[in-house]
Image (cartoon, rainbow, N blue to C red):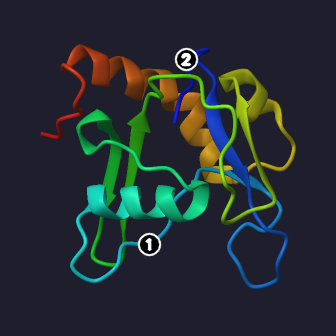
Amino acid sequence: MENIGGKLLFQLRDNKYGIPNPNKWGLFGGGMEQGETPVQAVRREVKEELGIDIKPSNLRLLFKKESNSSKRYVFYYKLQKEQESFRLGEGQKYQFLSLREIILKRNVVPSLRLFMIMYPLFKFKMCKLGGVLRHV
């Protein structure tokens, strides 16, 4: 999720034993429930974790990785107005950060750091293809 100032929204994950990447900065999200599409899942997760409804027409697929054992989707969403606060349902806190700020943070989910280094390429490709990343 990107604000009107161009910063991206990240979550400081809970510091609980047994969860993946405790006390690290990551993206908001979660698993898909039985019968859910990726878009339905991201809308539900954002509602649960931030307390806001997002428009499916404004979601853009940035990255998709599917295998026999897992499916991962990363969506882009541009806020249409300045969002001052969210109702945090999961995690310790949230923060809008620049690309540089998240890459340089010490406690970042390792795969997120790599993704954020490559993020400009994904975003460029998305823009070049009219807003939707198409896989060939």
Location of residue 54 by image quarter: top left
For residue 69, what is the image quadrant? bottom left
Residue 2 shown left or right of residue 21 in the figure: left
Q: Where does the image place residue 4, in percent across and percent down from the top left?
A: 55, 17
Q: At which x and y percent is residue 15?
A: 85, 70
* Left or right: 9 in relation to 100: left
- Which residue is depicted at the point 44% across and 72% down? 31
Dot 2 alpha-carbon crowd within 10 angstroms: few under 14, some 14 to 19, many 20 or more: few
Observer-nearest residue: 44 or 105? 44
Instruction: Assess disc 1: are there few (<14), some (14-19) or many (≥20) residues with their C-alpha within 10 Å of its C-alpha.
Output: few
Please indicate whether residue 18 sits to the left or right of residue 2 in the image: right
Above or below residue 65? Residue 84 is: above
Q: Secondary structure at mark 2?
A: loop
The secondary element bearing badge 1 is classed as loop
Q: Amino acid at mark 2?
A: Ile
| Residue tagged 1 | 31
Front residue of this view, candidates 129 and 11:
11
Residue sitting farthest toward the left: 136
- Residue 74: give x, y in percent of width and height: 41, 47
In percent of width and height, residue 70 lies at 36, 72
The answer to which of 101 and 1 lies nearer the viewer is 1
- Residue drawn at x 63%, y 23% is 7
At 73% across and 66% down in the image, what residue appears? 21
The residue tagged 2 is: 4
Is residue 68 shown above or below 40?
Answer: below
Look at discs 1 and 2 and give the one toward the viewer: 2
Is the residue 114 above or below the residue 50 in the image?
A: above
Residue type at mark 1: give it. Gly
Say which quadrant the C terminus sits in.
top left
